[in-house]
Amino acid sequence: MAQTDLAQTFKQLKKLLNKHAKGLAKYDEYPGSQAKEKKPGLHLLGKREVSIAGRKPQPTYIVGIIQQKNSVGFYHMPVYSHPLKFKLSATLQQALKGKSCFHVKEATPEILSEVEGLIRDGIALYRKEGWI
């Protein structure tokens, strides 16, 4: 896959995150990141600190993207914290690496539509939980 294709995929996913960022904190890199190489990214977190599962209060990470070498990493914490609340298409299920990271290689209309639904529904779920 050409870097220009990945750059376009990143740009389209970033547009979706920005569309749903109202009332959230936005960061170009994960706060406190120790990464040696800075890669293009965008992360959305809640603005207030909350304690989840007895952990130290901190802003809740919701969703983010990082442009990697061969894909765009799409990180969606609601899929991890509430797996039964989300049904994934076969295509997105195949892109899921780990519990909350999707490796998106191409921004097809179907993937963009599904990702936008995940972002919207994840933010709504975390608001309902009182986490953001």
Image (spheres, rainbow, N blue to C red):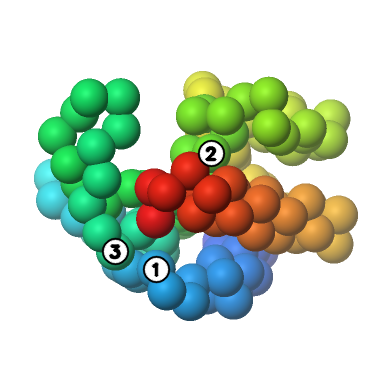
Using the rendered view, name the quadrant where residue 106 is placed: bottom right
Can residue 79 be seen here? The reply is yes
Q: Measure the alpha-carbon separation of dots 2 and 3.
A: 17 Å
Question: Which residue is the site of mark 3?
Answer: 47
Q: Which residue is mark 1?
A: 24
Pointers 2 and 1 in contact (C-beta within 8 Å): no
29 to the left or right of 62: left
- Residue at 39%, 47% (x, y): give it: 131
Rendered image: mark on residue 50: none
Mark before the other along the chain sequence, 3 or 1: 1
Splitting the image into 4 quarters, where does residue 39 fall? bottom left
Sequence-first tag of 2 and 1: 1
Mark 2 or 3, nearer chain start: 3
- What residue is drawn where x is 29% and y is 64%? 47
Examine the rendered structure and indicate whether residue 33 appears above or below residue 42: above
Of the pair 124 and 105, the residue shown nearer to us: 124
Q: Is residue 83 left or right of residue 92?
A: left
**x then y, percent, for residue 77:** 48, 39
Q: Which residue is pictured at 20% across the width and 28% down the height?
A: 55
Question: Tag 3: residue type?
Answer: Lys
Q: Is residue 128 above or below residue 98?
A: below
Instruction: Between residue 26 and residue 105, name the one nearer to us.
Output: 26
